[in-house]
Image (tube, grey):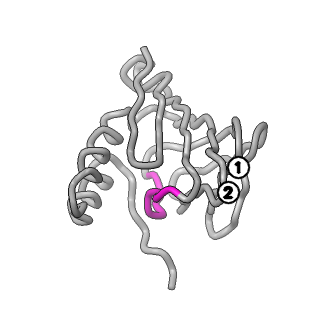
Amino acid sequence: MTETIRIGGLELEFLHSKEDTAGSVDVFKMTVQPNARMPVPHYHESWDETVYGLSGTLNFRVDGQDVPVGPGQTVFIQRGVVHGFSNETQAPAACLSILTPGVLGPAYFREMAVLLAETPPDPARMKETMLRYGLVPVAPKA
């Protein structure tokens, strides 16, 4: 069963999650609107992420290097490696994200959607939520 979660200019369509794969994998389609606000740079403590471009172009910043991901292109983000992403184009961009093992699930994104809907969002609560789910935020370098 799929589930769609919207967080501002970000839409996630969960195709498989840790709940229906016995923790093997999380798979979701991610659509990012142009110039949408994206998560802060971070790393994952317990899983690797593979991204496959479907449409448009997303810019991933992985370990300090810019990696454009367009249709048919991929990027592998090993656990512990700082990364972030953005859509700096004038068109929506979509990719397939595969997290192995599946330890995140859609619950994290549901919680972040609620926190980001608050005015103003509480950065301390967002950081606490990230850490509780194994995402470690990293302050951008000046």
Where's residue 37, x and y in %? 46, 59
Mark 2 and mark 1: span between their CA atoms?
A: 7 Å
User: Percent from the top left, x then y, of residue 80?
Assistant: 51, 57
Residue type at numbered disc 1? Thr
Q: Nearer the viewer, residue 121 or 106?
A: 121
Q: Residue furthest top?
A: 1
- Point out the frontmost of discs 2 and 1: 2
Q: Residue at x 26, y 65 (%)?
A: 123
Q: Eyeballing the image, is 27 above or below 7? A: above
**Front-most of 135 and 125?**
125
Residue 46: x percent and y percent?
Answer: 44, 45
The residue labelled by disc 1 is: 57
| Apparent side of residue 37 relative to residue 72 in the rendered image (left or right) | left
Q: Position of residue 27 (x, y in %)?
A: 52, 29
Element under disc 2? loop
Q: What's the residue at 71%, 44% (across, down)?
A: 56
Query: Which residue is at a point 32% across and 53% down the rendered structure image?
Result: 130
Name the kind of residue labelled 2 in the image: Thr
Disc 1 crowd rating (10 Å Cα; few below 14, some 14-19, many 20+) is: many
Secondary element at image label 1: loop
Front residue of 138/112: it is 112
Judge whether residue 18 is colored magenta: no
Q: Which mark is residue 89?
A: 2
In the image, which residues are magenta?
36-44
